[in-house]
Amino acid sequence: MDVEPPAVHPKAPTPGTELGIHFDECFGCGDEFEAGLHLRSRIGEAQTVYSEFTVTAAHQGAPGLAHGGLLACAFDEALGSTVGNLLRRPAVTGKLETDFRRPVPVGSTLYIEARLDGTAGRKIYASADGHLDAPDGPIAVSARALFVAVGFEHFTTHGDPAALKKLADAQEKAKRVREGRDWEINP
Ligand SMILES: CCCCCCCCCC(=O)SCCNC(=O)CCNC(=O)[C@H](O)C(C)(C)COP(=O)(O)OP(=O)(O)OC[C@H]1O[C@@H](n2cnc3c(N)ncnc32)[C@H](O)[C@@H]1OP(=O)(O)O
């Protein structure tokens, strides 16, 4: 099947939009776990998403240096957020390839610019570059990923249905608050 240019969803958030946490307990973006990556993302121009990840002592592999697996996790999150927010299609990572080009010290911040590259049926291609300590800093890590679109049953079948229900309820409540209708008698 040919790879087609990605079609951004008409209701995708617009450039400049700060993207919130998609799940409090997500290791990539959630706030629930102190050692998590606490990635913060916003929509950029032309099918891009910018994310920032500051490396702490909790993310070390060698003394004073980030663990490569956790850097890969940051890219998985940044790329997943790009796919999820721009295409608004549930998808999971099928393949993730990383090039580690420079060491990333504790205390440094990676500025990750991720983009959609194309789609082919359920397959979604995306890639990203991580710049060291400034949006135009040297590239320390690059990644390419294949996401595969899935139905919601992927999460209900393989994940935790009770936690999913809690998440759906929290998202619905946040939507009601955003729309100024958080006054239902039976919340
Ligand atoms: C706003 C939201 C923000 C979210 C951010 C979160 C980011 C984090 C994202 C993740 O980390 S997700 C968790 C890690 N990933 C997984 O747990 C996925 C585990 N794997 C699976 O569940 C299945 O293998 C998968 C759904 C990916 C595919 O199984 P399916 O049976 O549904 O599909 P199938 O195997 O028929 O593959 C569909 C197509 O994808 C291709 N494909 C699948 N996996 C592939 C792979 N690994 N490499 C290459 N191609 C692959 C496959 O060849 C095929 O291509 P064709 O259509 O051309 O035939």
Image (cartoon, rainbow, N blue to C red):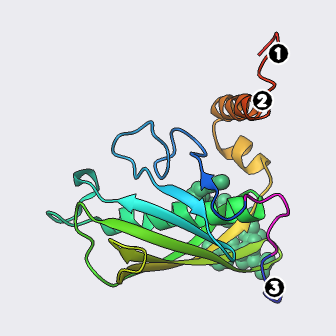
Distance, label 2 to label 1, CA atoms, is 9 Å
The magenta stretch is 7-13
Which of these two is toward me, 122 or 182?
182
Residue at the spot of label 1: 184
| Mark 2 vs 1: CB contact within 8 A | yes
Disc 2 residue type?
Arg
Question: Which x, y percent locates residue 14?
Answer: 72, 61
Question: Which x, y percent locates residue 175?
Answer: 75, 35
Q: Is residue 6 visible?
A: yes
Report the image quarter containing ligand 1: bottom right
Question: Which x, y percent locates residue 101?
Answer: 33, 85
Q: Earlier in the sequence, mark 3 or mark 2?
A: 3
Q: Earlier in the sequence, mark 3 or mark 1?
A: 3
Q: Is residue 98 visible?
A: no
Q: Is residue 148 above or below residue 128?
A: above
Residue at the spot of label 3: 4
Seen at 22% across and 62% down, the residue is 106
Does the magenta portion include 11?
Answer: yes
Q: Nearer the viewer, mark 3 or mark 2?
A: 2
Q: Nearer the viewer, mark 3 or mark 1?
A: 1
Q: Which mark is residue 174?
A: none
**Figure quadrant of residue 168:** top right
Seen at 66% across and 73% down, the residue is 45
Residue at the spot of label 2: 176
Distance, label 3 to label 1, CA atoms, is 44 Å
Q: Is residue 1 above or below residue 42?
A: below
Which of these two is toward me, 93 or 157?
93
Q: Is residue 140 above or below residue 168?
A: below
Disc 1 residue type?
Glu
Most common SS among magenta residues: loop
Local crowd size for mark 1, using a 10 Å CA cut-off: few (<14), some (14–19), many (≥20): few
**Quadrant assignment for the N terminus:** bottom right
